[in-house]
Image (cartoon, helix red, strand yellow):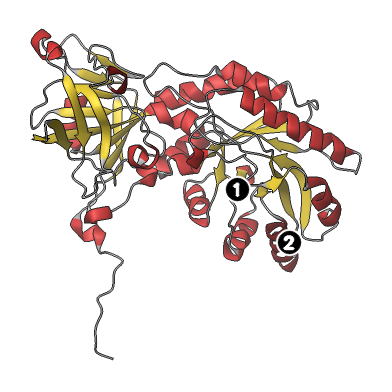
Amino acid sequence: MNKNNVKEYNDNRGHIGLEYGRDAQLYFMGHKIASLAQSFGTPLYVYSADLIRSSLASLKTALGDRPHLICYSVKANSNLSIIKLMRELGCGADIVSGGELYRCLQSRLSADGIVFSGVGKSGLEIKEALEAGILLFSVESEAELMLISQIADGLGTRAKVSLRVNPSVEADTHPYISTGREHDKFGISHTKIIDLFKKASHWKGIQICGLACHIGSQILDVSAFGNASKVLASIGMQLERLGFLWEYLSLGGGLGIDYGDGKEPSVNDYVRSILNEVPLKSTKIILEPGRFLLGNAGILISQVILQKSNGGKKFYVVDAGMNDLLRPALYKSKHKILSHCILSESQRQNTSPADLVGPVCESGDFFAQNYHLPRLNAGDYVVICSTGAYGFSMSSNYNSRCRGAELLIDGNFSYLIRRREKYEDLVRLELEYSEER
């Protein structure tokens, strides 16, 4: 087998927040993995409040005294307790649906810190956001801008909007999460912004007060953010001559994280690449991180069901499936896998390539392929690292599987923030068809 296609397993080295104790057991932020699994069951998502705070603090430090607003990207993880924590840490929110707006309001996050992004806002969602009093709409087309103006005018108000620019910038990331290329569905072409501003700047229902862009997710080369910022700065200066006042400049999110391969961009370099291109220090910079704050603050614990072989290939089947964590199947993304205990020397010597897979009836239901793993036994626990963002929020009930629980660790305490689903939850909203009229 080609060793370039095999990841080496080393369970003596943890990952962010994970370490092996003197008792040879794996701990996450001081809490024993096996104890968490036995107390709350598996599959189990676990998040660390301290790691979230640390990531946010590093971003705020890099921004320094530059006027800014950090809007947590709710789509990364929309649990009410996570949104509440972000509110307590002084964050606003970046939302992309009426449902996310509802979650933010339920978490008592102030509406005047909410930016509404997304290419397909419905009339009802726009109305709800206006009535809630959100800070800003990030507008992605002329048609959307016109719709917002009409709805706002009908309500006797004016909507604050920023124009989302598609800067035609390539970001070295998966094509499914690249959003700033010329042929992507997102934003307004940078060549059309000036004309749209001239056309819409006097519409009754809107106040154009910012520019925005978002070029993708899991971006490791921070120069791409600088390139996008340069495009926005150039457009902004042209608009100034037409009377445009820069109140807000939103550079979106997208900063990548270390998924266990040691690749991690510098937060200071990321912020510097943006600020170096934005000349007006009075302009409030809006950043919308999601993965950066949550990705490495969360893990997924799963239990081994059995081991099997087919055609000389070894499989370990665990109780989490692609319905619990979709990223490997959707993006072929890589996550580090750890055993819940340190292995003996003989076990470490006997690692071999295997696939870690789930029980879902799809060949795409895998977490790792050709990954050097030790011999695992039924009942053992494995930890899938870096799953705090786009893990539970992308989960589903496919195969009529109940989704697992979510747990938040804060210091010495652990809090159940979403209970494990039961079978009756699967059919709670369904109505039985009847031929009787």
Q: Is residue 188 placed above or below 311 in the rendered structure?
A: below
**Relative image position of residue 416 (x, y in whole percent):** 29, 39
Q: Quadrant of residue 48?
A: top left
**Residue for badge 2:** 146
Residue 27 lies left or right of residue 273; in this view the side is: left
Q: Is residue 121 placed above or below 68 in the rendered structure?
A: below
Q: Amino acid at mark 1?
A: Ser
Q: Quadrant of the N terminus?
A: top left
Q: Nearer the viewer, residue 29 or 77?
A: 77
Q: Earlier in the sequence, mark 2 or mark 1?
A: 1
Q: Give SS at disc 2.
A: helix
The Cα atoms of the two marked residues, 2 and 1, are separated by: 16 Å
Residue 408 lies left or right of residue 1; in this view the side is: right
Q: Nearer the viewer, residue 362 or 110?
A: 362
Q: Residue at x 21, y 31 (%)?
A: 355
Q: Give SS at disc 1.
A: loop
Q: Quadrant of residue 17?
A: top left
- Residues at discs 2 and 1 in contact (Cβ within 8 Å): no
Residue 339 visible in this rendered orientation of the protein? no
Which numbered circle lies on residue 336? none
Q: Residue at x 35, y 33 (%)?
A: 387
**Residue for badge 1:** 117
Residue 374 visible in this rendered orientation of the protein? yes
**Relative image position of residue 197 (x, y in whole percent):** 82, 50
Q: Is residue 219 placed above or below 108 in the rendered structure?
A: above
Q: Nearer the viewer, residue 185 or 340?
A: 185
Q: Amino acid at mark 2?
A: Met
